[in-house]
Image (cartoon, coloured by chain):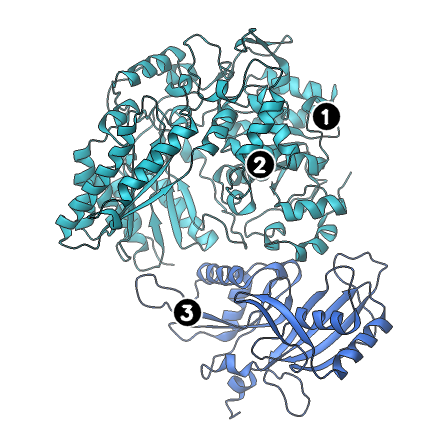
Chain colours: A blue, B cyan
């Protein structure tokens, strides 16, 4: 199942989303399978959730059902049951349990309010020409230091200018677009932003608005994530 | 005049704060009405963090009832955490509602539900962020009426300076009546401004407007009298009682948050009121008489609530849920209906007897038998007679033995420390009781795999109870007894490892005591604490006893009273208490007699099953006990 988290619902954490999905599944009477044992849990698993505060057009989850369901009907039912902003986009019957492994990379869009395009272009240039960009992030295991450069396959200033939410209408923003390979430790959009600050002093005035646009197997030819459901839909080999 | 959403200004702040989802609204079953189409607009506040406030039943019920009125709208607002408060101040974003992010100051009423006095400083933060003057007398026609409700509103005197009005008791009908008064007044062109509106509300007799009453003091600090300062306001203000709960089956559309909250379940109140007569229990005294919701209405509400919310847990709420006249049929009927659906049922607030274990067994049919909770409250038999919690040691041991032998592995026991007439031995008795519990459990199961947890907190005397005259125990004594109890439990080689111990230290209870039985002079202390940064006093990581004591020393320096005077001082029979003009229906002479009986270890029976003992509520309020049985049963749900 592919779903989006949009608008103000980008502030949900992955725990918030899992509670919302479980309740929506119950309200929509979807025949979800439960684990055995003393405290049965619905069989729903979430692949690589976008961080709290980051919007996404391409989040994925797998849901186990007790009997065959029509994917179109399931999409419509669950979408109607979820709050607006958590929107179910696509549902396919899984051929195997390998969805998470097929999510090899993501395309991200970053809107940087109040940044001049030339300044952003210079920062991007400095970032992509560097061999390594060491960043630090506080994780659950403490402060970790790692390279944010290698996992970034492409990073560019997008043509034209947009606007970020909550911004004055007359203040444009710069839009960056990047493809990042999923690695360990994961390189997140804020790590790249940290990198841009370190290599070129790029510092947006207010928090950037980040959206995941796509997620999937990295296409060797284009370098972009392809649709991870192609495998399930065509029934062919990878 | 329409109002703009504050969300575009709030949104850039949200990535910088903890748990931003709590500020965005959009809960399932929340309501956003058109501003211009409503003539009466309520902002409802629970003065604590969203995670505590969202599940609050009182706010949810009033929110739904008010929004059902065609010309009225209600939105909700909660206390913002200090991280967002700082950003809102620096960016000039005022206190907002989470529904449509409208500024709180633009509403007609700011209704605040106080379950506990520890939310008072959060009220001041919200008023200040909203741009509403803290002092009620400085407010203009541009400010909402600040209206307090909830159990703490039965003595609103410590916040009398900050509120315009208070309402006692059940909110359903009076909220509608207040809306009606405001609508009429606005339809007439708001004659006389807010003063006339408050006068109209006060003259109904159901709304307390503190500024229409003067408090006069004796030179020694005691209150001489509380009198109306203008014609047309009643000398006493009465509580409100909803008499037929089946006519008010709310919440019908329970709010389902995206953020995690403290109660992730659908709750149904199965009855209101309690006449067990526990003398420490303010809730039991001020919510009389008992009014049951019928078994069939409860069944319908559960079915509807699960369908509307998607929650997988249902809680049957009340002050003593096992006392419902048809609780057995209700438990069995609901357990039958939801067997195999992964919907779990819970029954908080039960008393100590074997019948409760039958109920708990019914509710855990498919699940694990983990823990059962009982509240003997007093550690010794004498103590339990003083507080009128009629549980003998024999009852307790028999009950826990049954629980352990039927597969329950853990028993939690709740107690209070610092009760009137308490001595060290009464608290240390808890250790002996807990050891006997474990001993009985090991005998019953033939296993050492049984546990017992003792949970204990400091007692705070509350208004409108027989203990309203009592001296609160000082925190040094409470803390010493709690320490000695801990040592007695931990030091025991045979049983110590099977007994868990959780306690709350005594200092916060002193502040709660100051606020519970305080008068209008305590407002200065609250304000000084708030100005010094006091927030979220119900949270141990934010609470500062020293801040409260320093503020009280300064704020009360010119008065003949201090914190001890409000807390550890016993009152005389005829001393005027700050809440004496606020009427919960309880006869003062009966309360005093019950206080004397407490000291003489004289118990009182429950008036549901024994003759009336003249507490005064029914004749004063024109109410009566409403209990079943109806004889009806819950039929299996038909699958469509």
Along the horizontal axis of the image, is B92 left or right of B451? right
Residue B172 position within the rendered picture, expressed as x and y whole percent measured from the top left: 51, 31
* Whether residue B426 is situated above or below residue B55 in the rendered picture: above
Q: Nearer the viewer, residue A236 or B429?
A: B429
* Whether residue B102 is situated above or below residue A103 in the rendered picture: above
Q: Which residue is denoted by mark 2 in the rendering?
A: B66
Along the horizontal axis of the image, is A153 left or right of B307? right
**SS of the residue at dot 2?**
helix
Q: Which residue is denoted by mark 3 in the rendering?
A: A43
Camera-nearest label, 3 or 1: 1
The picture quadrant where one finds residue A103 is: bottom right
Q: Residue at x 60, y 36 (%)?
A: B534
Instruction: Give me the disc on residue B139.
Output: 1
**SS of the residue at dot 3?**
loop
Q: Residue at x 58, y 17 (%)?
A: B204
User: Can residue B100 be seen by looking at this rendering?
Assistant: no
Chain ID for label 3? A
Dot 3 crowding, Cα within 10 Å, few <14, some 14–19, many 20+ = some
């Amino acid at each position: 199942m592919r779903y989006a988290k949009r608008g103000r619902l980008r502030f949900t954490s992955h725990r918030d989303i899992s509670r919302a999905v479980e309740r929506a599944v119950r309200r929509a009477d979807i025949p979800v399978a439960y684990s055995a044992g003393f405290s049965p849990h619905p069989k729903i698993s979430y692949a690589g959730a976008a961080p709290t505060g980051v919007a996404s057009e391409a989040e994925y989850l797998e849901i186990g059902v007790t009997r065959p369901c029509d994917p179109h009907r399931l999409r419509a039912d669950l979408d109607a049951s979820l709050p607006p902003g958590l929107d179910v986009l696509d549902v396919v019957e899984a051929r195997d349990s390998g969805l998470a492994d097929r999510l090899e990379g993501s395309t991200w869009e970053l809107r940087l309010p109040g940044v001049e395009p030339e300044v952003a272009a210079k920062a991007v240039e400095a970032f992509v020409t560097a061999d390594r960009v060491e960043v630090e992030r506080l994780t659950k295991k403490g402060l970790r230091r790692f390279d944010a450069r290698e996992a970034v396959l492409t990073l560019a200033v997008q043509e034209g200018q947009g606007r970020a939410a909550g911004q004055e209408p007359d203040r444009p923003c710069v839009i960056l677009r990047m493809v990042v390979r999923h690695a360990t430790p994961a390189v997140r959009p804020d790590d790249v932003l940290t990198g841009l600050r370190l290599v070129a002093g790029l510092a947006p005035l207010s928090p950037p608005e980040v959206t995941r646009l796509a997620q999937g197997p990295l296409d060797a030819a284009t370098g972009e994530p392809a649709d991870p459901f192609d495998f399930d839909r065509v029934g062919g080999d990878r | 005049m329409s109002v703009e959403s504050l969300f575009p200004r709030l949104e850039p702040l949200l990535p910088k704060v903890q748990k931003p989802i709590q500020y965005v609204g959009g809960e399932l079953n929340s309501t956003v009405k058109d501003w211009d189409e409503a003539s009466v607009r309520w902002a409802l506040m629970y003065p604590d963090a969203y995670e505590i406030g969202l599940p609050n039943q009182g706010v949810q019920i009033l929110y739904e009832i008010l929004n059902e009125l065609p010309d009225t709208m209600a939105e909700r607002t909660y206390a913002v955490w200090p991280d967002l408060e700082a950003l809102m101040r620096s960016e000039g974003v005022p206190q907002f509602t989470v529904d449509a992010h409208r500024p709180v100051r633009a509403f007609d009423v700011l209704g605040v539900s106080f379950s506990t006095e520890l939310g008072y400083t959060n009220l001041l933060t919200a008023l200040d962020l909203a741009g509403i003057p803290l002092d009620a007398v400085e407010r203009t026609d541009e400010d909402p009426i600040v209206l307090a409700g909830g159990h703490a509103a039965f003595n609103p005197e410590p916040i009398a300076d900050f509120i315009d009005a208070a309402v006692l008791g059940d909110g359903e009908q009076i909220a509608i009546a207040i809306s009606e008064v405001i609508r009429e007044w606005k339809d007439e062109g708001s004659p006389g401004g807010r003063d006339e509106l408050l006068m109209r509300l006060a003259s109904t007799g159901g709304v307390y407007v503190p500024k229409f009453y003067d408090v006069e003091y004796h030179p020694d600090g005691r209150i001489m009298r509380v009198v109306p300062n203008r014609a047309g306001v009643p000398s006493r203000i009465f509580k409100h009682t909803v008499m037929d709960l089946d006519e008010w089956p709310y919440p019908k559309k329970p709010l389902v948050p995206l953020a995690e909250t403290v109660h992730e379940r659908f709750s149904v109140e199965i009855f209101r009121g309690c006449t067990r007569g526990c003398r420490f229990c303010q809730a039991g005294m001020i919510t009389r008489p008992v009014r049951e919701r019928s078994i069939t209405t409860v069944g319908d509400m559960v079915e509807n609530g699960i369908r509307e919310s998607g929650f997988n847990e249902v809680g049957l709420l009340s002050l003593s849920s096992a006392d419902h006249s048809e609780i057995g049929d209700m438990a069995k009927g609901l357990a039958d209906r939801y067997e195999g659906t992964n919907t779990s049922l819970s029954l908080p607030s039960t008393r100590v007897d074997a019948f409760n274990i039958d109920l708990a067994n019914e509710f855990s049919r498919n699940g694990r038998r983990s823990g059962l909770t009982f509240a003997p409250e007093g550690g010794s038999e004498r103590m339990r007679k003083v507080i009128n919690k009629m549980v003998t040691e024999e009852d307790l041991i028999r009950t826990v033995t049954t629980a352990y032998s039927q597969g329950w592995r853990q028993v939690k026991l709740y107690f209070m420390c610092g009760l009137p007439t308490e001595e060290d031995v009464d608290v240390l008795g808890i250790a002996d009781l807990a050891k006997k519990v474990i001993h009985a459990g090991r005998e019953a199961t033939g296993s050492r795999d049984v546990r017992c947890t003792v949970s204990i907190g400091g007692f705070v005397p509350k208004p409108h109870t027989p203990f309203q005259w009592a001296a609160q125990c000082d925190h040094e004594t409470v803390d010493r007894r709690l320490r000695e109890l801990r040592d007695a439990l931990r030091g025991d080689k045979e049983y110590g490892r099977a007994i868990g111990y959780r306690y709350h230290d005594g200092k916060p209870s002193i502040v709660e005591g100051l606020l519970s039985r305080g008068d209008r002079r305590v407002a200065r202390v609250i304000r000084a604490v708030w100005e010094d940064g006091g927030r979220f006093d119900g949270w141990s990581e934010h609470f500062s006893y020293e801040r409260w004591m320093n503020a009280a020393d300064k704020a009360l320096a010119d008065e003949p009273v201090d914190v001890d005077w409000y807390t550890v001082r016993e009152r005389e029979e005829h001393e005027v208490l700050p809440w004496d003009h606020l009427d919960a229906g309880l006869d003062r002479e009966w309360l005093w007699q019950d206080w004397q009986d407490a000291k003489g270890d004289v118990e009182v029976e429950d008036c549901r099953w024994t003759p009336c003992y003249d507490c005064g509520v029914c004749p004063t309020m024109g109410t009566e006990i409403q209990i079943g049985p109806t004889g009806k049963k819950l039929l299996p749900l038909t699958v469509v």
